[in-house]
Amino acid sequence: MTTGPAAPTRTATVDVVVPVFNEERSLPGCLQVLDEFLTRTFPYPATITVVDNASTDRTPEVARALADRYERVRVRRLERKGRGLALREAWGASDADVVVYMDVDLSTGLDALLPLVAPLVNGHSDLSIGSRLAPGARTVREPRREFISRAYNQLIRLLHGSRFSDAQCGFKAARTDVVRALLGHVRDESWFFDTELLLLAEHNGLRVHEVPVDWVEDVDSRVDVVGTAWDDLRGLLRMARAKASGQARIGDLPRRPEPRAAHPDAVLGRREGGLAWQLLSFAVVGGFSTLANLVLYAVLRQWWPLLAANLGALVVTTLLNTEANRRFTFPGPDTGRVRVHGQGLIVFGLYYLFTSAALLVLHACVAEPSRLLELSVLLGSSGIGTAGRFVLLRRWIFQPTSAPERDI
């Protein structure tokens, strides 16, 4: 008995996108290492797309020469800069089943590429991200950037209830059919693109897979850390408004079931209780916020003047503190994130004026106070301001408009 030929099986294809700007020296080594890795160990058919982000050096010529040398390499040229723009254009035009993004410096170990892609190929997940902050990750970078990264990702977690741990690692992948629907709703074309994409994905019920990675910092990085951080903060607030208005909802996407025990705001947990619990919870949240404020102030004071450093530290820690208290200290009915943070900013203004006045009085009384004395005065004024903050939070911001009846 003879049998017919076996039906051909289709293998998923992968497109690895590498955005570049003025990388004529780095690009040849990157493509050589990447091509050898894909040929030697990667089980899926893969192409490499180099996206030239309006380079002004010889990067375009170098990229075309490398495309002639390596069969799997393709080149796209854009006349405008922007990492997000590069990914939008390349991912949106790709004919592969899975699209990947990685930095040209190959800071992330390539051993994580298959774990990144496999959950997308088998349909378990919709997007995958490399994480430098997940358990098992190994990272080498300077303390300042480590602190900024952890603070930023914690801010995302508190403001948006996100479950992913590292929004901006340059090592991501997505199912092409899913990400195309998301790309049209991502407004940012620069460094906030990654965060916006992930927040949209989670908000619309997609599953984000996280892979701990080995990551070594590129000492030649040209990222403007302060400018990027400011743009990211504005982006987070814009995304909060989009969620509140319903503009972040996207149709025609696969829906993943929520974990049975999950709650959309259950980042810090919820517990009903009276004044005793509120005081205890507020004290714990306030303690962490005060510590974060002092550390952030000391960091910013290295580059910024007195009042600017105090303002920057207070803006970040106030947003964190208000959201933590909304979720943990004063749970109750949902009072609305936009309204809460609007009123929280008013309280912040009063708090900032009080702590800044304390610092100005110090400098008026002492010609050149030490940094330790500055921090001590800031700590004392923060303690007094915190007491007033608790009263305003309890009696104004988180005071429900109507108290529901409760069984006794």
Image (cartoon, rainbow, N blue to C red):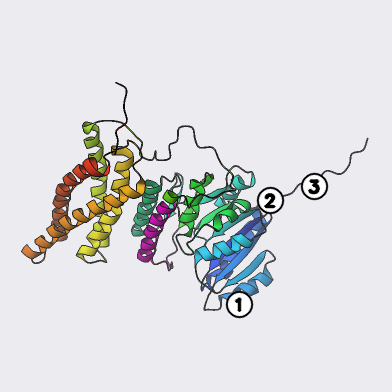
Q: Is residue 329 left or right of residue 241?
A: left
Closer to the N terminus: mark 3 or mark 1? 3
How far separated are the C-alphas under marks 2 and 1?
31 Å
Residue 61 is marked as 1
> Of the residues shown, which amino acid type is indicated by label 3?
Pro
Q: Is residue 304 left or right of residue 227?
A: left
Give the residue furthest to the right: 1
Asked if the magenta segment contains residue 368, the reply would be: no
Residue 16 position within the rendered picture, expressed as x and y whole percent measured from the top left:
60, 59
Q: Residues within 10 Å of mark 1 (few under 14, many from 20)?
A: few
The residue tagged 2 is: 12
The residue tagged 3 is: 8
Q: Is residue 303 left or right of residue 210?
A: left
Dividing the picture into quadrants, the one containing residue 206 is: top right
> Of the residues shown, which amino acid type is indicated by label 2?
Ala
How far separated are the C-alphas under marks 3 and 2?
13 Å
Which segment is the magenta one?
217-242
Q: Residues within 10 Å of mark 3 (few under 14, many from 20)?
A: few
Q: Is residue 36 left or right of residue 273?
A: right
> Of the residues shown, which amino acid type is indicated by label 1?
Glu
Q: Quadrant of the N terminus?
A: top right
Q: Is residue 332 above or below residue 159?
A: above
Residue 247 visible in the current orientation? yes
**Between 323 and 105, the one nearer to me in the picture:** 323
Q: Name which residue lies at 55% across and 62% down.
A: 87
Residue 273 position within the rendered picture, expressed as x and y whole percent measured from the top left:
27, 30
Tag 2 secondary structure:
loop
Residue 51 is marked as none
Tag 3 secondary structure:
loop
Tag 1 secondary structure:
helix
